[in-house]
Amino acid sequence: MPNDIASLILALTVSMCTMAVALPAVMGQVNAAARRAQVGVCMQALGWVLLLVSSMVAGGSWTDRLLSTLSMAGIAGGLALNATAFNLWCGRSPSARMPAVVAVVLTVGYALGFSSYAFRVSWANGLLALQMTMVAVTLARKPLVPVGGWRWLLVLALAAQVVVTAWRGALAAFDTMAFPSFMAPHPINLLFALVANATAVLSLIGILLAHRDEAARALERLATLDGMTGVLNRRAWLAHAGVELANAARYGHRLGVLLIDIDHFKEVNDSRGHEAGDHALQFFARALQSACRSGDLVCRYGGEEFCVLMNRADLLSTQAFDRRIRAYLAEAAPREIGYPLNYSAGIAVSSASDDTLDAMLRRADVALYSAKALGRGCTLDAEALHMSAT
Ligand SMILES: Nc1nc2c(ncn2[C@@H]2O[C@H](COP(=O)(O)OP(=O)(O)OP(=O)(O)O)[C@@H](O)[C@H]2O)c(=O)[nH]1
């Protein structure tokens, strides 16, 4: 059995080192979460290497104390980094101060109490079990973004490792003679080595899948959002608005489309520079979004044109939205961007159950064109225009 345990611990160390080298190569360019996970794996790999080396030097010597303490710092620090990585991948803030605090307390306590075998082993195993619990809780908490079912596999493996690690801590404290080293021929050591190997494999799978989910979300963002303003792009807006119009027809609601074109925007670019122009577009998009109700859809229709789909809205409520935006711009634009910003707009409200998005956009565009022709800075509605023309 001692040889079995030594082989399994060696296999675990080799797996961790392989992961530490392979992850950066396989994952390519990474974000903050993946970077933390990679560094976390490297630290754990280093920790296991140092623990193995420490078992080869004279027990209780200063070299043993130094190597063992550094190995604890590596394993505990790596776990703390993994906790923050999984927090980020679950859409939460990266702050996971507790696992980091536990890693520091564990290392310092281990170094200070090194001369007592029972204390240092129970201290390290107890606090490592606490850290693993924190990583498992991080994964088990409801994520704020879609995360695959893989997290439950990792939670299960971590839960098993928590039990075995805490058990080792208890044995070291209360039955020290039966548990003289982490490679001693004790069934719990064998169980620990097996579970640790399984958790290492599942961690690798978890890190790769979390990274893949994150990349898929980033691709979706790129495909649906306008990169500069963060509102929907035209293609995504058309797809969503088409669904909303079909629902409106089915349930007998009305909806309004407000097509907006910022006035004299070329002058902003020409006199203040392209960067100021970009800043103004971002401010304008924010203003539209904050004035919307949930269910409304804002998009950047093109250059300095925006389009808003107002769900369950008739002409009066679309006009009220337009007035709110104008009042907000008059007050906030000079304050936020340093000069006034105005726009012309056209409104089209869904008329019959067979109305189409194309037809509504055409009517809104005609109304917008007329608003520009009237001298800009105003909003016209397509129905009124149509009535006055007939
Ligand atoms: N800074 C910046 N400018 C943009 C962007 N997209 C389009 N524009 C500018 O928007 C301006 C649009 O000019 P025009 O079509 O003449 O419209 P306008 O100056 O607003 O005049 P009217 O619409 O007739 O009031 C051009 O100068 C474009 O370069 C962008 O992403 N960033």
Image (cartoon, rainbow, N blue to C red):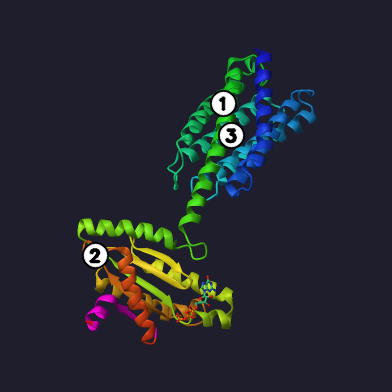
User: For mark 3, does the 10 Å Cα neighbourhood hold few (<14), some (14 to 19), or many (20 or more) residues?
Assistant: many
Q: Identify the image quadrant of residue 37.
A: top right
Dot 2, crowdedness within 10 Å: few (<14), some or many (≥20)?
Answer: many
Q: Amino acid at mark 2?
A: Arg
Determine which residue is flagged by label 2: 254
C-alpha span from label 2 to label 1: 57 Å
Question: Relative to residue 300, is residue 165 drawn left or right?
Answer: right
Mark positioned earlier in the residue sequence (3 or 1): 1
Amino acid at circle 1: Ala
Q: Amino acid at mark 3?
A: Leu
Residue with the mark numbered 3: 204
Residue at mark 2 to residue at mark 3: CA–CA distance: 51 Å
Q: Is residue 380 magenta?
A: yes
Q: Nearer the viewer, residue 210 or 115?
A: 210
The label on residue 198 is 1
Which is more toward the observer, 121 or 365? 365
Rendered residue at 53%/29% (across/down): 162
Which mark sits nearer the N-terminus, 2 or 3? Answer: 3
In the rendered view, would you say 86 is above or below 265? above
Count numbered badges in the picture.
3
- The verdict on label 3 being within 8 Å of ligand 1 is no
Query: Circle 2 — which element?
Result: loop
- Residue 40 in the image: state x and y as whole percent: 63, 40
Q: Residue furthest front?
A: 390
Number of the front mark, 3 or 1: 3
Q: Are marks 2 and 3 in contact (CB under 8 Å)?
A: no
Can you see residue 149? Answer: yes
Give the residue drawn at x 56%, y 76%: 276
Numbered range of the magenta stretch = 376-389
Taking 354 as reference, is 125 above or below it? above
Residue 1 lies in quadrant: top right
- Asked if the residue under mark 1 is in contact with the one under mark 2, i.e. CB atoms within 8 Å, the reply is no
